[in-house]
Image (tube, coloured by chain):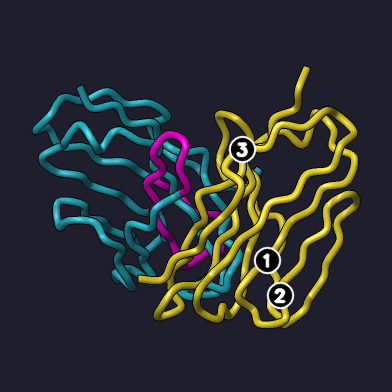
Chain colours: A cyan, B yellow
Amino acid sequence: ETGVTQSPTHLIKTRGQQVTLRCSSQSGHNTVSWYQQALGQGPQFIFQYYREEENGRGNFPPRFSGLQFPNYSSELNVNALELDDSALYLCASSPSGPLGTDTQYFGPGTRLTVL
Amino acid sequence: GQQVMQIPQYQHVQEGEDFTTYCNSSTTLSNIQWYKQRPGGHPVFLIQLVKSGEVKKQKRLTFQFGEAKKNSSLHITATQTTDVGTYFCAAAGSGNYQLIWGAGTKLIIKP
């Protein structure tokens, strides 16, 4: 196991609602990235946090937001849920800072279903 | 934006046959990483390639990085049922802070 945990494992919401997903990084890892993985596709980068600040963002609207806390755990918040937001949400922590060259350690993911 | 193309989307093999997946980019890559995702699981890091022409082996898995650092391949010799899953390549994107992922190749073992 990677030591990265996510909660909850599954979640069902309805359109227009808001959701918060949580991630606890592997000990000592100061960088966390969030990904959305639709069924049958590769992970899509949402954003990355390094030392509590957003370090980079993919092509996702502002209703996707996040936080990283001093203990390096983090949250992904999604407002005004849409049906297309149904996906597996993965967080990945890495030990050496905000570099794409760093190995990423993934959590088990949260499966979000929007009805 | 930067894209990483991965083919094929699926590969059906008999147990014991070989499997290969390919990743291509139109731009030079600083590195490429390979991950495996089992059905219902999450991506697990396999390896990172950095140098032009680099070849790395892990038991029955052979990873190659092209001389121009624009393509990469993963080859599995004599597949086993434990190899089932989707194999992804991922490369550092612009700004070097994110990974750009291929669409994955799903390895299916025929019964």
Discs 3 and 1 share one subunit: yes
Q: Is residue B61 shown in magenta?
A: no
Q: Which residue is mark 2?
A: B66
Identify the image quadrant of the C terminus of chain A.
Answer: top left
Residue occupying image coordinates x 56% and y 47% = B104
Of residues A115 and B69, which is closer to you in this image?
Answer: B69
Q: Which residue is mark 3?
A: B10
What is the three-letter code of the residue carrying label 3? Tyr
* Label 3 Cα neighbours within 10 Å, binned few <14 / some 14-19 / many ≥20: few
Alpha-carbon span between mark 3 and mark 1: 17 Å
Callout 2 secondary element: loop
Name the spot of residue B3 as percent of width and height, x first. 44, 65
Q: Which mark is residue B72?
A: 1
Q: Is residue A25 shown in magenta?
A: yes
Residue occupying image coordinates x 33% and y 73% = A55
Residue occupying image coordinates x 29% and y 26% = A113
Which residue is at the far top?
B111
What is the three-letter code of the residue carrying label 1? Ser
The boundaries of the magenta stretch are A23-42
Judge from the rendering whether residue B77 lies leftward or rightward of residue B66; answer left or right.
right
Judge from the rendering whether residue A79 lies leftward or rightward of residue B2; answer left or right.
left
* Label 2 Cα neighbours within 10 Å, binned few <14 / some 14-19 / many ≥20: some
Asked where in the image residue B39 lies, by quadrant, the reply is top right
